[in-house]
Image (spheres, rainbow, N blue to C red):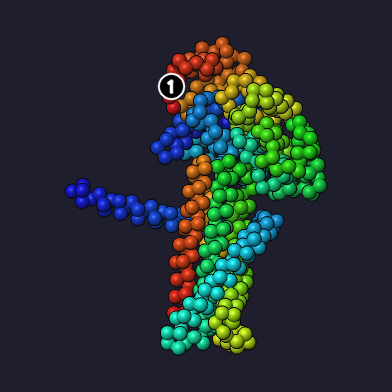
Amino acid sequence: MIELRDVHKAFGRKQVLRGLTLGVAQGESCVIIGGSGTGKSVCLKCILGLVRPDSGQITVGGQDVTQGDRDAFLARFGMLFQGGALFDSMPVWQNVAFRLMRGEGKRPKAEAREIALDKLRRVGLTGDVAELYPSELSGGMQKRVSLARAIAANPEIIFFDEPTTGLDPIMSGVINDLIREIVTEMGVTAVTITHDMSSVRAIADKVAMLHAGKIRWHGPVDQIDTADDPYLRQFVTGSADGPIETVR
Amino acid sequence: MTVLLTPLASIGRSTLALLSSIGRVAIFVARTLGHVVRPPFYPRELAHQLLHIGWLSLPVVGLTALFTGGALALQIFAGGSRFNAEAVVPQIVAIGIVRELGPVLGGLMVAGRVASAIAAEIGTMKVTEQIDALVTLSTNPMKYLTVPRVVAATVSLPILVAVGDAIGIFGGYLVSTTRLGFNEIAYIQNTTDFLEVWDVTSGLIKGAVFGFLVAIMGCYHGMKSGKGARGVGRATTNAVVSASILILAANYLLTELFFNA
């Protein structure tokens, strides 16, 4: 479904991606792990076309991401941003219904609101929060709203950027379970980037470890504890000793 | 030899930096203008911005004009009395406000109020990934954020200037009739007889140009804001400073074009 071939990207002199090659099959939940600054977010932004790679090819469903109708292309995606990225100038329900009220598949306001409320319920929020503004919500609730926005237009592919960052362990567990349920229930292709091992175990079918701008290890989630790659070992165990430099 | 070349190199670097930022702003302006005429349009956003940029700037612009008109009347009376020309107060107040001080001070006040707000809002949206979120929701940030602000500022500033003109002249009238002993009817008569249509319209055109500059600078600096609170703070400062300087420079050029060509 998603194919990245030999993707390179540098920002100024800083080489972030150095020949990234990765494939994600349809309906698969792939989790990309790796330390801070290894290029995980840049990888997602390249797929979405928010960042243009210097070289290499990225295709989604066989179609090159740099070609064709951008709006139709982006309509296939939903994305949960790290900080939520909710629009603070509008109430919660309008955030969730944002795509439904604009562009090609535009629906009447009442219908869009109904769908938004339904999606909010799906992520465990009641109608009371619909009229609140994002700044009035707790971090966990903001994540839920952001998740509701990501699934509002029934996308084929969902990206989750650090879904549990800034949440307490219990709320992290709740969000992880919610993501797993939604991914399975909607049958979407999911790509998650995280450095939280509890997310990896809860969400992933496949795990890809990114290190120094390349995929260091790629395999099923049940092999991450038995694989003998020293980089993966160090990351999974959270050890300060190992081949990955700890001063970054 | 290198000692001699160092200052030259730094002059070269600053010149290149200046030229490249002019180029970036020019590209930004061209892209904005391209989006103004192509759908989709966001009328609700435009209405919202008209309210924020236009209507809510009225008190600031009005008060500025009122006090400036009053002070101008006092100054012209004092200056004019040195060569027995006190009687020209109504005419000079009117022409000074309508041609210069109305648009320039109005523009500068709006630059302080609006360019900063736009840069801070868009800069924060960029830092918190809201701009990226817009793109993933198939909404072009230039169309959704920049175009409504630029159109709203360009349309509302001439109206603000017109209101400011009236209030400024009224400020001069108030001071002249209560403090300087002018006759009420004669003051209004002198003002209306003296002013020409072009005096007013030239000021309104200036207002439109200043409004455009204010919104463009706010959006441009917001969109290229650096990371964190520091980045947004710098974007806000740069927006206000560049908008103010561009207003003053454009004012000179327009005055040259309108009245000296």
Please tell me whether residue A97 is drawn above or below residue A221 in the rendered image: below
Q: Position of residue B4 (x, y in %)?
A: 21, 51
Residue closer to the observer: A176 or B165: B165
Q: Position of residue A120 (x, y in %)?
A: 76, 36
Residue B131's quadrant in the figure?
top right
Please tell me whether residue A232 is drawn above or below residue B122 in the rendered image: above
The total of numbered circles placed on residues is 1
Could you tell me if residue B1 is visible in this image?
A: yes
Please tell me whether residue A234 is drawn above or below residue B116 in the rendered image: above
Q: Position of residue A102 (x, y in %)?
A: 71, 49
Residue drawn at the location 55% of the way across and 21% of the way down: A218
| Crowding near the residue tagged with mark 1, few <14, some 14–19, many ≥20 C-alpha atoms within 10 Å | few
Residue B212's quadrant in the figure?
bottom right
- The three-letter code of the residue at mark 1 reads Glu
Residue closer to the observer: A212 or B61: B61
Residue B15's quadrant in the figure?
bottom left
- Reading the image, the residue beneath label 1 is A245
Residue closer to the observer: A85 or A179: A85
Could you tell me if residue B225 is visible in this image?
A: no
Q: Position of residue A198 (x, y in %)?
A: 62, 20
Please tell me whether residue A233 is drawn above or below residue B39 in the rendered image: above
Tag 1 secondary structure: loop
Residue drawn at the location 66% of the way across and 21% of the way down: A202
Residue drawn at the location 71% of the way across and 27% of the way down: A178
Residue found at the very far left of the displayed protein = B1
Residue closer to the observer: B151 or A132: A132
Q: Quadrant of the C terminus of chain B?
A: bottom left
> Which chain is mark 1 on?
A
